Amino acid sequence: CLFSVRGQLLHAPSSMCSILMCFVAANAQAAAVAAGGGAAAARMEKRRPMCCTITLIVLGVLLLALGLVLLIAFPISIFPALVKSQIPLIEKEDGSYTKLTGFWQNLPQLATYDFYFFNVTNEDEIIYEGAKPHLVEVGPYSYIETEFKEGIQWLDDNTRVYYRSNKTWVFHPENSCTGCTEADIVTLPNAAYATIMATKVQNYMASDKAKVLDLLLQIIGEGPMRSVNVGGMLFDAYDDPLLDVINSNLTKLLINIGGDGTLGGVPIPDVPYMGYFPHYNHTNDEDYVLRTGQDDPMMAFQIEKWAGQDKLSWWSGEAAEIKGAGDGTFYKPFIEDTDVLKNFQSFSCRAFDMEVSGHEKWTGIDATVFTFPDDTYDSNKEHNIGYRYENVEYIDYFPDWPTCKKDHVYQPWAIEGCEDVDCRFDYNFCSDCCDGSHYDRTIFMPPGIVPLRCFPGQNKRLPFAGFLSPPHFSASPHQVHDTMVGLHPDPDGKHQAGRWWINSVTGGTVHAIFNMQLAIPIYNDADFMMTTHMRNAFLPSFWTHIDANLKPYAHDFIQLSAQTVPIVAMALGWSFLVIALLFFIISFCCYRKAGRNKGGDEEVHQYSYNVTIEDEKAKVAAPVGQAADLERRRNSPAQLYPELYGKDSAEGSTASWKSKTLQKEGSTEAWS
């Protein structure tokens, strides 16, 4: 902004301050006019409104452009580019990590694991009388879980990263049930006994060999149920007589003598400790290979391999796929409502699909809510058939399911077209071409139940039949609940399978809940004496409620990055537009004022050409602004030729000053 004050050139930066400078300079010009007078001062006075007008227009255009950038370009292209630039996992040259990479390496979450056990209260009646199991839920026994990544290696030009996830659980009595400790005793299905029964059916063992194993179980005191303390059942492991026999030096010697890795043709299960998570504290599950996002931020955090494989060997078809899944903590940025996220949970030995179910705020952060589909645990659907249990023991645990019409008769030989009916799927179970849940040499499980194939978090087959489901079999039909006493399913509340709150901008999980139940089947087998009077049943052992929340510093970072910055940008954008509009209005007013001043000047020049003696006398008293004009009037045509422009009275009272002067000089002939 340039101003001239008394011949001096002033310069102010093109900013908000230039407006103030403009008015200061203009006031200085006004002062000069008042003090010095003259034609130059008058011209400076007339330029003052135009200076302000130009300055305000320039600033208004700049603010308008900046406002449009913040309101249009920033949310569409600039902000997404900024977010994507921060997403990739990056190790700096000095070995440190970027902000988000640091969060990934040392997970900034508070995770609580609440364990609830189903204590069996009628063990003897179940074994000897075939009674329904009576269960009493006890808990929660609460643990705080923390984890961090270790063994990090950057691969393939830093586009992939190898790591292991180290996890620790610490008992938290304050969050546990009143008076509950890890020393509490609970009666649960005996995993060791179930392992031996599973060994028989999985190896198609002859009856005489199975009875030898049964004799061994009786000698060492194993039964279908076992009472163990909570700490031993979870993370501390507990002593078991069968495990002592399996891991004894005598057994190892006999296996070596056989030379085939079996004991008399019976494979020995590899179970070093007994428990559900024995000695898992301060250890990691299998290793991971992850996409870093350096080559494509939209592919960041996707699992490439787990335990050296991109497919799970114990599943088939789509169920085996884990490539492209996340681990539940971070996902790609800018998630859309149509996206289906894959969530791999190593403790469940499988991946879960998650779909958008709504939008909510979680502790002030906008989040997209993802939930598991209703058929997540239904292996009777075509897309879930890879999770189906083989049921080699051929036990109908739920004979009342499915519920078909009363006149349903299985007679495929008598119905034409049965060869085109696929009896593997639930929509055909009640067809007369199909035999309900029975198919070939297997029996299907009801919805809400899928097998657990591996030791939690390990690439090792589970040696007994374990099953996963939502708590209290909440996704299963009533025929499952009716097989035992003490279940209270709440599928839409406490017992829902899973729910993730994910910030769609950054892809970070701000809150998550995951519920999972483990059940062990007990069934009647004539080769095992203690089961000969038992009814077939699925006994739930425990369920866990996992609740994960961000730590405050991570929460604040995501809130700032994903919400505060866009809001501030939008607020500034609208503010700049409003200020620009005000500048345009003020500049218009200044322009109008300049126009009025110009009009006033023109009026000064539209003078009367009858300048009288009284006008001359008034010269001294005339405003300074009109002094120059009066001088010019003396030499105007009106003064030189008054007869053409003015009146000349005989009395001379109204004769012009110039006319009288010419008469005195005797030059009247000059008018011709």
Image (spheres, rainbow, N blue to C red):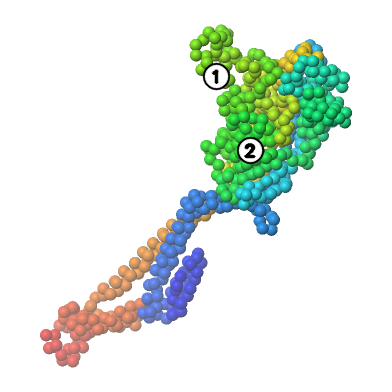
Give above or below for 304 relative to 451. below
Q: In what quadrant of the picture does the C terminus appear?
A: bottom left
The kind of residue on which mark 1 rests is Asp
Mark 2 element type:
loop
Q: How many marks?
A: 2
Q: Residue at x 39, y 68 (%)?
A: 50
Which label's residue is closer to the chain start, 2 or 1? 2
Amino acid on which the number 2 mark rests in the picture = Asp
142 shown above or below 550: above
> Which numbered marker is on residue 521?
none
248 with respect to 172 (left or right): right
Instruction: Residue 381: name its quadrant.
Output: top right
- The residue at 79%/18% (across/down) is 210
Q: Which residue is mark 1?
A: 422
Q: Residues within 10 Å of mark 1 (few under 14, many from 20)?
A: some
* Residue found 56% across the figure and 52% down from its top: 82
Q: Position of residue 237 (x, y in %)?
A: 82, 32
Left or right position of 22 against 178: left
The residues bearing labels 2 and 1 have C-alpha atoms spaced at a distance of 30 Å
Q: Secondary structure at mark 1?
A: loop
Q: Is residue 146 above or below residue 574?
A: above
Which residue is under mark 2? Answer: 310
Closest to the observer, 349 or 6: 349
Q: Nearer the viewer, residue 459 or 583?
A: 459
- Look at 75% across and 39% down and name the residue there: 144
Where does the image place residue 162, in percent across and percent down from the top left? 68, 46
Q: Residues within 10 Å of mark 2 (few under 14, many from 20)?
A: some
